[in-house]
Image: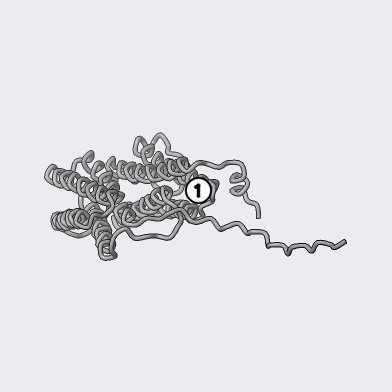
Amino acid sequence: MRTPFSLLAERWHPSAAVVRRAALSALVMSVFIVVTGGAVRLTGSGLGCRTWPTCTADSVTPTPAMGVHGVIEFTNRMLTYVLCAAVGWAILAARCARPWRRSLTRLGWAQFWVVMSNAVLGGITVLTGLNPYMVAVHMIAAMALIWVAVATWERSKEGDGPVRPAVARPLQQLAYVLVGVTGVLIAMGTLVTGAGHHPGDSSDVYRIPLNYDRLAQLHADFVFITVGLSLAVIFVLAAVKAPPAARARARELFVVLLVQGVIGFVQYFTDVPELLVGVHMLGAALTWIAVLRIPLALRTRDAAEEPAAALPAPQAPQETATV
């Protein structure tokens, strides 16, 4: 069955470099949408558009009476279409490349559906008046999008052959533990946000009924655990002479965690200024990317072998006629 995708694939054959750039653009936009979503909350524009999917009951776009908050909220909604365009480019590039890598196309479509589900979660967040639990789920879904985008980008740089571990299985499991602990750290950060400052609107927004200072301390405890575990991964990978790429990524994560930790402590003791909170959200996305890339560097995947062309069947020798 011929589809628009197959018709385009007959006429456009992007190079491997184009596929990698398309996957990277989707990842960059996934991070950018996290930062702009944070800007909506930090400027108190979370309810700039009071309903969803329209901005008001009678208007798709913000009205002059809604002021700058309506413009900020609506602009962030429109950036979802830019994100969809970046993901769409990644899907088309993967589909039209030769040879066609079906697994890479599926990862692109997974990004698209995560974007769609996150848009719905964003609408529910508005309709529930910025419920902090929904805000946390919205942020975690954004991190899920980054997860798939990282996987797509890394897979675009390798083949579809069998996975070959580059280190022993216990080291791979240690890397997965580091990913899990970092995920808990980021989830804890969403709870701190839900109980603390910057609810997203100047109205009386419901907050998580937990002690903010204790949550912040628990979050800091997970920072120490994550930093210590990342340092252990650095030493272990160096001891077993793991691939240079894996060791470099472990060091990158350690540096990002240190910077992120310093920003977190400074913002806590300076009454959580908006600019530092926005930088901290960017740091959370970069931390998540850094830790996800470590397990992916602990294995290799060569290009899949092309099936051998069928050879013509040998023909029986013809008998020579005798005179």
Please identify the quarter of the rendering in which residue 188 is found: bottom left
* Colouring mode (rainbow / by chain / secondary structure / one colour): one colour
Q: Quadrant of the C terminus?
A: bottom right
The picture quadrant where one finds residue 38 is top left
- Residue located 22% across and 40% down the image: 274
Across and down, in percent, residue 92 comes to: 52, 46
Q: Kindly identify the amino acid type of the residue bearing the numbered disc 1.
A: Ala
Helix, strand or loop for disc 1: helix
Residue nearer the viewer, 275 or 201 = 275
**Count of all numbered marks drawn on residues in the image:** 1
Q: Nearer the viewer, residue 197 or 155?
A: 155
Residue 269 position, x and y percent, is 11, 45
On the image, which quarter does residue 280 sit in? top left
Q: Residue furthest toward the right?
A: 323
Q: Residue furthest front?
A: 323
| Whole-percent x, y for residue 235 in the image | 17, 55
Q: Is there any visible trace of residue 72 in the rendered image? A: yes
Q: Is residue 119 visible?
A: no
Whether residue 74 sits left or right of residue 323 in the image: it is left
Left or right, 30 with respect to 95, comes to left
In this view, the residue farthest toward the left is: 269
The N terminus sits in image quarter: bottom right
Q: Which residue is mark 1?
A: 94
Residue closer to the observer: 32 or 287 = 287
Q: 169 and 258: which one is in front?
A: 169
Residue at 45%, 57% in the rendered image? 161
x, y percent for residue 245: 29, 49
Q: Along the horizontal axis of the image, is 126 left or right of 85?
A: left
Disc 1: CA contacts within 10 A as few (<14), some (14-19) or many (>=20): many
